[in-house]
Amino acid sequence: MRKSRSTPFLRRRIPAMFASLLAVSASGGSPVAESDERFERWDRDGDGRLVRDELPEGLRGNFERVDRNGDGVIDLREHLAVVGRGRVPPPPSMESVRVIGDIAYAGDGNPRRRLVLALPARATVEVPLPLVVCIHGGGWRSGDHRAAIAELMGYAASGRYAVASIGYRLSSEAIWPAQLDDCRAALRWIHDHADRIGIDRDRIAVFGRSAGGHLAAMLAVRPDPPVRVRAAVDYYGPTDLLVMQAQAPEGVVIDHDAADSPESRLVGAAVQSRPGVARDASPINFVDADDPPMLVIHGRRDRLVPFRQSVEFAQAIRDAGGPVTLLAVEDGGHGGFRDPSIPAAVRRVLEHHLHDAGEPPSGVDPAEFRKP
């Protein structure tokens, strides 16, 4: 039986910080976590914003209508407000969640090496609470941890979880393995301060989309003792950098082997010219039977990260004797999934592995997608 105890952080209310977080999310100053295939395809420079010239020519006449705040760019929230009404949930009230941020987990003042914590104002289960950690996407070259946490606020508001979102150095500042080093450092900070925060250091799950999914998978297959995650959720993350271009489907929008691709920028040169670093940055090369359970979610029509990346990754985990569930979204691209069973499957994974409740979702056999 876990004993309930109060902590200084749990008693602390920080309404000003939470208000600023909501302002960023509502104003469109940063991309939200939900994605959309068209947005990703049109965003040619991967900066999380669309300028007029990035839109298809026939849609440019709608630019001012979609650019609601008139700042000359369309961010993901503005895009979804037009093409995906109802898909961006309102944030929880300030009364239900307490936010602590930005925490400089590395102690060096780097604004990228920071994390945000969101704790329920009133826990509905015994504390210490399990923690869900979000890692933002953006091709390792863009994205913001302060915006990414919005997707997990509902978990904190439920009173059953604490949540965190961690930032890391982008590829324009540092190449691999800096991104993994930063995520590990953030988890070590959480591990070392778990008692004060009211977090159960033995019940931590990691969650990420695209580049964030890649890093979540890396934390699962390359643990950094004493921190070891209990479960990982990988939404369409790259898993084998050297074969991404070979696996690319028809209509791919990125040449993954090009010197300016996100993968090449991550490893510091054209990806095929640095095979050793590329292998080191590929989760598929580190799977074994001791890995924590992993939920891998991927759209079959993804034209940014090939669906085959997740198929081969899931198969490699199975072959190694590790636990994995693969969910294939039939009409899904690079995010923007409309199927409500997908977020429901994530909730079931977190409930099962962090609360010992219910049954995890069943997935598909990756071998079905490997047939000629």
Image (cartoon, helix red, strand yellow):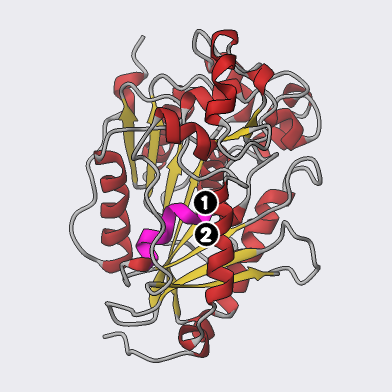
Residue in the image at 55% along x and 41% along y:
214
* Pointer 2 local density, CA inside 10 Å: few below 14, some 14–19, many at least 20: some
Residue in the image at 62% along x and 72% along y:
189
Q: Report the side of 339 relative to 212 (left or right).
A: left
Q: Quadrant of residue 145?
A: bottom right
Q: Amino acid at mark 2?
A: Leu
In the image, residue 280 lies at what x, y percent? 67, 40
Disc 1: which residue: 26
> For this rendering, which residue is in front, 307 or 65?
65
Q: Amino acid at mark 1?
A: Ala
Cβ–Cβ under 8 Å for marks 2 and 1? yes
Disc 2: which residue: 22
The image shows residue 120, relative to residue 242, as above or below, that is: below
* Pointer 1 local density, CA inside 10 Å: few below 14, some 14–19, many at least 20: some
In the image, residue 55 lies at what x, y percent? 60, 17
Q: Residue furthest left?
A: 358
Q: Report the side of 235 relative to 103 (left or right).
A: left
What is the span of residues highlighted in magenta in the rendered image?
A: 148-156
The image shows residue 153, relative to residue 365, as above or below, that is: below
Q: Quadrant of the N terminus?
A: bottom left
Residue 226 seen in render? no
> For this rendering, which residue is in front, 122 or 80?
80
Please check the rendered image and state whether residue 155 is part of the magenta-colored stretch, yes or no: yes
Q: Report the side of 169 relative to 208 (left or right).
A: right
Badge 2 element: helix
The image shows residue 204, relative to residue 75, as above or below, that is: below
Overall secondary structure of the magenta stretch?
helix
Residue in the image at 54% along x and 20% along y:
62
In the image, residue 358 lies at what x, y percent? 18, 59
> For this rendering, which residue is in front, 49 or 181?
49
Please check the rendered image and state whether residue 96 is part of the magenta-colored stretch, yes or no: no
